[in-house]
Image: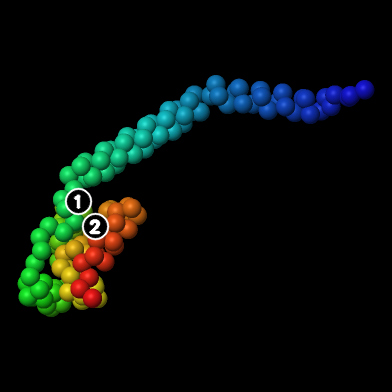
């Protein structure tokens, strides 16, 4: 014969009664409404971010716009090596952002006199791993050695 543990049953009923009292409390309802507002706000922000990403993907300019002569590339690299930070447009989405121009010149020299602006990718686009891997493939094609 299976026995029923009435102590456990009484404790479970007490917990249910406390929960019902707590849910009927107006302070609880106010907290619940605030939590719902926060959740709605977060959902709206997520939707806005997704729409922004979609707009950016639709309006992407080509990664490398024009082919510069080796002399022009060399002049641009020297100019970038002499300067500090500057504002450059992202090659993926076209948004201007602040970047260390010396680092771009270093990468251009490292890859064999590639246009330094080809390495200007904003932090938001850099988070997209698919984009970065496709960019690396395109830069490897540009290598002169």
Report the side of 20 relative to 28 (left or right).
right
- Mark 1 is surrounded, within 10 Å at the Cα level, by few (under 14), some (14 to 19) or many (20 or more) other residues, namely many
Taking depth in this image into account, of 111 and 3 the one nearest to the observer is 111
Q: Position of residue 46 (x, y in %)?
A: 34, 39
Inspect this view and state whether residue 76 appears.
no
Question: Which residue appears at 42% of the width and 30% of the height?
Answer: 36
Residue 122, labelled with which disc?
2
Image vertical order of residue 79 relative to residue 37, above or below: below
Taking depth in this image into account, of 65 and 95 the one nearest to the observer is 65
- Mark 2 is surrounded, within 10 Å at the Cα level, by few (under 14), some (14 to 19) or many (20 or more) other residues, namely many
What secondary structure is marked by label 1? loop
Q: Coloring scheme of the render?
A: rainbow
Report the side of 12 relative to 6 (left or right).
left
Q: Position of residue 96 (x, y in %)?
A: 16, 56
- Comes first in the chain, label 2 or label 1: 1
Image vertical order of residue 110 relative to residue 10, above or below: below
Q: Position of residue 115 (x, y in %)?
A: 15, 68
Question: Which residue appears at 20% of the width and 67% of the height?
Answer: 142
Report which residue position mark 1 lands on: 93
Report the side of 107 relative to 77 (left or right).
right
Taking depth in this image into account, of 64 and 3 the one nearest to the observer is 64
Q: Would you say the residues marked 2 and 1 are in contact, meaning their CB atoms lie under 8 Å apart?
A: yes
Q: Position of residue 95 (x, y in %)?
A: 17, 53
């Amino acid at each position: 014969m299976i026995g029923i543990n009435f102590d456990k049953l009484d404790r479970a009923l007490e917990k249910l009664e406390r929960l019902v009292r707590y849910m009927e409390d107006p302070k609880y309802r106010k907290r619940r409404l605030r939590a719902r507002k926060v959740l709605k706000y977060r959902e709206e922000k997520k939707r806005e971010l997704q729409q922004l990403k979609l707009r950016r993907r639709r309006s992407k300019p080509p990664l490398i716009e024009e082919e510069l002569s080796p002399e022009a590339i060399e002049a641009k690299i020297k100019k970038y090596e002499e300067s500090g930070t500057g504002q450059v447009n992202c090659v993926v989405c076209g948004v201007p952002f602040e970047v260390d121009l010396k680092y771009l010149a270093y990468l251009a020299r490292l890859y064999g006199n590639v246009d330094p602006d080809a390495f200007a990718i904003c932090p938001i686009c850099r988070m997209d791993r698919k984009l970065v891997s496709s960019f690396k493939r395109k830069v490897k094609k540009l290598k002169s050695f």
